[in-house]
């Protein structure tokens, strides 16, 4: 029987030979600007903890108090016995925060996409998808059985050409894009995508996983950033990045939300978000409603780090957000660079194929509001040392 799986051993060896094998490190501490990783204290340039909320005292307290009152897990799917008043409170608060009429929560951002896309389009329909959309969007498109037409990355003109050619051949059409692209840090031109989608009578969906808590006033996301309130039909988000917890959310048109309560498969067939997670997410929303301080600090740190790393001589690609790719090219070099950074006290993982195209491997630095200027200076100096050591910079 084991012989049937020998091919896996061969494929794993191929990954190692190509420098594409993921060697997963283990954290021994809470998230923050500094971490204990594999027993070493290192500067954290890896996490999606944009606002430093993952170990914020108010979120911890909210989770503890809710657990004492409600227990840990809902013990059921939402449609049977798993909907608690905390879920309703969170969805109402999230809708208000996003300035939409309605919102629905899921177990993760990935699940939110898997729920939404197949519920909106089916065989006989068409999806127009940015060619660099996240894997969860790609998988949601596959599950939907709709025809998928990819358009050039962040190119409204390219989308329009595809729509002109294909739109009339299908019953329903959905245009879907990431808001902030997680590997390059660039922002979708959502305002122009909206105009094109509207002209061709397409529903418009944006996955704002890396935009919520980052873009817009006080972190309200890409729709707020472009002032498109009431124009984007579906906003998908995750609560595992800037919000510092875990979970997913779909916000926007109340008809869409009502339909997802009836036909969103992860909503119907998987247990609800856990009690401490929902309570912590509520606390995160409250913090963002109270002040823009954390979002402002995130952007202050971003501007400083990206300016300084460019002066040193590194290529940061197309980014216009706190996601800062250090472009290196080949995966073996990126893995060696990451290993040398770790030896010198910086935790920043290499990213290569299939997460990014071949030849575009990188170190992805994730800036956080929890970093001090001193932290950033220390990281910059180590990047300079390793870059010179490996011949990446002069």
Image: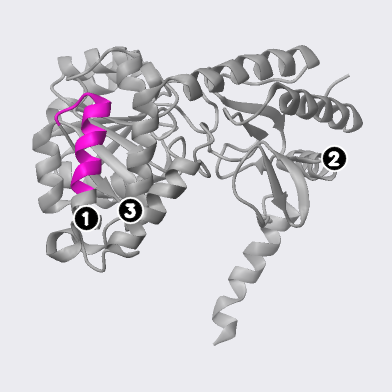
Marks 1 and 3: in contact by CB < 8 Å? no
Helix, strand or loop at mark 3: loop
Is residue 344 depicted above or below 380 in this figure?
below
Marks 3 and 2: in contact by CB < 8 Å? no
Q: On the rendered image, what quadrant is the C terminus found in?
A: top right
Q: Position of residue 297 (x, y in %)?
A: 55, 20
Quickly name the residue at label 2.
344
Marks 1 and 2: in contact by CB < 8 Å? no
Is residue 208 depicted above or below 108 in this figure?
above
Residue 266, image quadrant? bottom left
| Left or right of residue 297, residue 126 in this image | left
Quickly name the residue at label 3.
107
Which residue does the image show at 28% across and 23% down from the upper left? 162
Mark 2 neighbour density, 10 Å: few (under 14) some (14–19) many (20 or more): some
Nearest to N terminus: mark 2 or mark 1: 1
Q: Is residue 145 visible?
A: no
The residue stretch that appears in magenta: 87-101
Q: On the rendered image, what quadrant is the N terminus found in?
A: bottom right
Nearest to N terminus: mark 3 or mark 1: 3
């Amino acid at each position: 029987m084991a012989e049937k799986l020998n091919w896996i051993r061969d494929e794993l060896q191929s990954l190692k030979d190509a420098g594409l094998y993921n060697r997963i490190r283990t954290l021994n501490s809470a998230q923050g600007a500094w971490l204990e990783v594999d027993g070493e204290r290192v500067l954290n340039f890896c996490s999606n903890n944009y606002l430093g909320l993952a170990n914020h005292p108010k979120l911890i307290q909210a989770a503890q108090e809710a657990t004492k009152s409600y227990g840990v897990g809902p013990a059921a799917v939402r449609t049977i016995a798993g909907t608690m008043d905390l879920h309703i409170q969170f969805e109402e608060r999230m809708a208000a925060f996003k300035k939409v009429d309605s919102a629905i929560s899921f177990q993760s951002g990935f699940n939110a996409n898997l729920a939404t896309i197949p519920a909106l389009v089916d065989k006989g329909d068409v999806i127009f998808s940015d060619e660099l959309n996240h894997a969860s969007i790609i998988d949601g498109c596959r599950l939907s059985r709709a025809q998928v037409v990819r358009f050039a990355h962040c190119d409204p003109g390219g989308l329009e050409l595809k729509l002109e050619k294909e739109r009339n051949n299908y019953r329903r059409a959905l245009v879907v894009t990431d808001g902030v692209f997680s590997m390059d840090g660039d922002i979708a031109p959502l305002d122009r995508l909206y105009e094109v989608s509207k002209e061709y009578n397409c529903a418009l969906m944006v996955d704002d996983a890396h935009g919520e808590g980052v873009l817009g006033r006080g972190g309200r996301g890409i729709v707020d950033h472009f002032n498109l309130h009431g124009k984007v039909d579906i906003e998908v988000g995750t609560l595992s990045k800037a919000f510092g917890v875990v979970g997913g959310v779909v916000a926007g048109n109340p008809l869409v939300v009502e339909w997802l309560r009836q036909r969103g498969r992860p909503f119907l067939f998987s247990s609800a978000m856990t009690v401490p997670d929902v309570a912590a997410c509520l606390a995160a929303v409250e913090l963002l409603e109270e002040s823009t301080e954390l979002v402002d600090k995130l952007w202050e740190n971003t501007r400083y780090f990206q300016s300084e790393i460019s002066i040193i001589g590194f290529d940061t690609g197309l980014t216009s957000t706190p996601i800062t790719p250090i472009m290196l090219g080949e995966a073996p070099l990126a893995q060696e660079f990451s290993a040398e950074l770790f030896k010198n006290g910086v935790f920043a993982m290499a990213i290569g194929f299939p997460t990014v195209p071949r030849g575009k491997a990188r170190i992805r630095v994730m800036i956080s509001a929890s970093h001090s200027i001193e932290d950033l200076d220390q990281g910059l100096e180590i990047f300079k040392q390793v870059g010179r050591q490996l011949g990446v910079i002069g």
